[in-house]
Image (tube, rainbow, N blue to C red):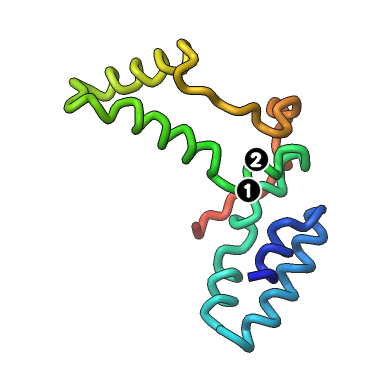
């Protein structure tokens, strides 16, 4: 829904928190289970906010990983059996090195070495 999208694509962690509270208030009336699920997930749903904002676009979804996986599956479709997991990994890296599988540059790649903001570990998770 638009409410969820507004929350996920907010510009700052503070704005995310404010929109999350508004989402929970609104959806508790419409569909309590949705609001309860979001409350239960807590900050774990927004771990991307601990990273530099330049990386948010790339880490909000798994599109890059899914695209790479689909391309790899397409390349090995003709193989009936791969002898081992090591063979699969070796084939993947060979396809990557030869340029048969291409990876797009991740938005925010310049800040990939930046440490995420420290957050206490949720032992209940």
Which of the pair 77/82 is nearer the observer? 77
Q: Is residue 28 above or below residue 106?
A: below
Classify mark 2: helix, strand or loop: helix
Is 75 left, or right, of 42 in this rendering?
Answer: left
Q: Residue at x 69, y 28 (%)?
A: 112
Q: Quadrant of residue 89?
A: top left
Which of the pair 7/101 is nearer the observer? 101
Give the Cα distance between marks 1 and 2: 6 Å
Residue ID for mark 2: 58
Q: Which mark is residue 89?
A: none
Classed neighbour count for the residue bearing mark 2: other residues with Cα under 10 Å, few (<14), some (14–19), many (≥20): some
Q: Residue at x 30, y 22 (%)?
A: 88
**Which of the image's four quarters has the N terminus?**
bottom right
Q: Residue at x 60, y 28 (%)?
A: 104
Horizontal and vertical percent position of residue 96:
46, 17
Horizontal and vertical percent position of residue 40:
55, 68
Q: Which mark is residue 60?
A: 1
Q: Quadrant of residue 81?
A: top left
User: Is the Cβ of the residue at disc 1 closer than 8 Å to that at disc 2?
Assistant: yes
Classed neighbour count for the residue bearing mark 1: other residues with Cα under 10 Å, few (<14), some (14–19), many (≥20): some
Q: Is residue 25 above or below residue 14?
A: below
């Amino acid at each position: 829904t638009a409410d969820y999208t507004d929350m996920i694509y907010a510009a700052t962690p503070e704005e995310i928190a404010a929109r999350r509270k508004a989402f929970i208030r609104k959806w508790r009336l419409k569909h309590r289970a949705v609001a309860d699920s979001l409350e239960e997930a807590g900050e774990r749903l927004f771990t991307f906010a601990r990273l530099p904002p330049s990386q948010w676009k790339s880490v909000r979804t798994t599109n890059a990983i899914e695209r790479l996986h689909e391309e790899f599956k397409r390349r090995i479709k003709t193989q009936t059996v791969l002898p081992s997991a090591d063979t699969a990994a070796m084939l993947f890296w060979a396809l990557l090195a030869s340029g048969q599988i291409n990876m797009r540059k991740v938005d925010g790649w310049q800040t990939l070495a930046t440490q995420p903001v420290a957050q206490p570990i949720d032992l209940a998770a």
